[in-house]
Amino acid sequence: MATIGIDGIRKSFGAVQALQAVELLVRDGEFLALLGPSGCGKTTLLRIIAGLETQTAGRVRIGERDVTDLPPRRRGLAMVFQNYAVFPHLTVFENVAFGLRMGKAPKDRVQRQVERAAALLHIEPYLGRYPAQLSGGQRQRVAVARALAVEPEVLLMDEPLSNLDALLRLEMRAELKAVLAEAGTTTIYVTHDQTEAMGLADRIAVMQAGRIEQIGSPAEIYHRPGSRFVGAFVGSPPMNFLRLPVRNGAAALGDLSLPCPPGTAAEVLLGLRAEDLSPAPPGEGFAFTLRVAEPLGSHVLLTGSAANQPMRAVVPYEAEGVGEGFAPGRVLHLRPHPGRLNWMDAESGRALEASR
Ligand SMILES: Nc1ncnc2c1ncn2[C@@H]1O[C@H](COP(=O)(O)OP(=O)(O)OP(=O)(O)O)[C@@H](O)[C@H]1O
Ligand SMILES: [Mg+2]
């Protein structure tokens, strides 16, 4: 078992700054999701940890070892690539066995570990085929099986399930989580799918433009985003942000006066999750003008505005106070869950410490 330490990693490709002083410590046996939009540097960071790319500055540690100057094969890790490269001239069995053969594993161990990984990824029927005879999703599962077969201490995966259909993806996700937890494998899992990150990870590192914006448990990232970017990137619908005037230490939202953290400027940004809003009697909430209502089954997604700014709310279909239904143009009264107010600096978009 092993930790992964990233100390001040920078990477430039000519004029492009792909990574800017990344600091990260992945705990022993932890499942860490690296989440961020396309181009934010996820693959670059993973390739540097694996030793496939040379950083401009900084160091990489695995367990007690500084591996910065070691070649990939001496770092003691396995990686699943974003483009799931498999060897076209080898059968599926030999593809999955590849790392074990490189490590000169005895024959019976190769057989046992290949079978185990193949069963897990549901690719047993294809062990005798060549990659050209497989679908994209099947090839991707071969690549994941190849990494798992060596039973690595550290596993790096770059969007490993992106080519699977929704149902298979859900199933593979649950199985991967169970197997890696049981084996105690330290895992970094790259994805730009926030539901996948929320569902799988012990902690999530949210990246933007070459830096880590926030690291925390899925609940922290979701309920206590460290910045406007994180609040908007994680969750569907994204977190609402309202720019509100502050007077005498309180922000005014319709009829509501909400005490702000001490030292707040003349304007503040209030982050509210759509489901942290609920109907209230007039006078006890703020006015919300409804534009569109979309039924989601047990709940309704309401799109409209409050304080002249766009807002979305998710409320139970039969909520008290909703009475006359959801006709467009109707004014509803809503109130926020008092424990779920996210105060952010109106200029920088960073969370105000005192609200956390
Ligand atoms: N070999 C390269 N030469 C020049 N620029 C590169 C190279 N590789 C990556 N970049 C740039 O570095 C930045 C980060 O790229 P990276 O592949 O790490 O993004 P990513 O987060 O993995 O994105 P995606 O989700 O689309 O895979 C991008 O702006 C990209 O254009
Ligand atoms: Mg990538």
Image (tube, rainbow, N blue to C red):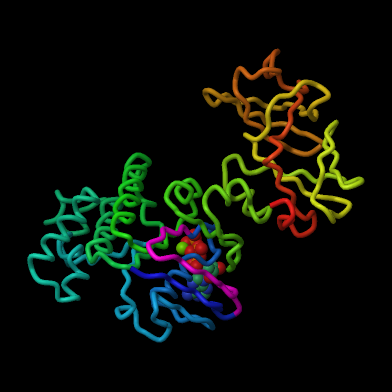
Name the spot of residue 76 as percent of width and height, x first: 31, 75
Residue 20 lies in the magenta-colored region:
yes
Q: Nearer the viewer, residue 64 or 91?
A: 64
Q: Image check: 233 left or right of 350?
A: left
* Quadrant of the rendered image containing residue 70: bottom left
Q: Image check: 114 left or right of 242?
A: left
Looking at the rendering, the stretch of residues picked out in magenta corresponds to: 15-33
Outermost residue, right side? 248
Question: Image point 57% across, 24% down: which residue?
Answer: 295
Outermost residue, top side? 324
Q: Is residue 353 above or below residue 46?
A: above
Residue 102 lies in the magenta-colored region:
no
Q: Nearer the viewer, residue 301 or 182?
A: 182
Name the spot of residue 349 as percent of width and height, x first: 73, 56
Name the spot of residue 22 as percent of width and height, x first: 56, 72
Question: Image point 73% across, 26% down: which residue?
Answer: 290
Q: Image check: 81 left or right of 346?
A: left
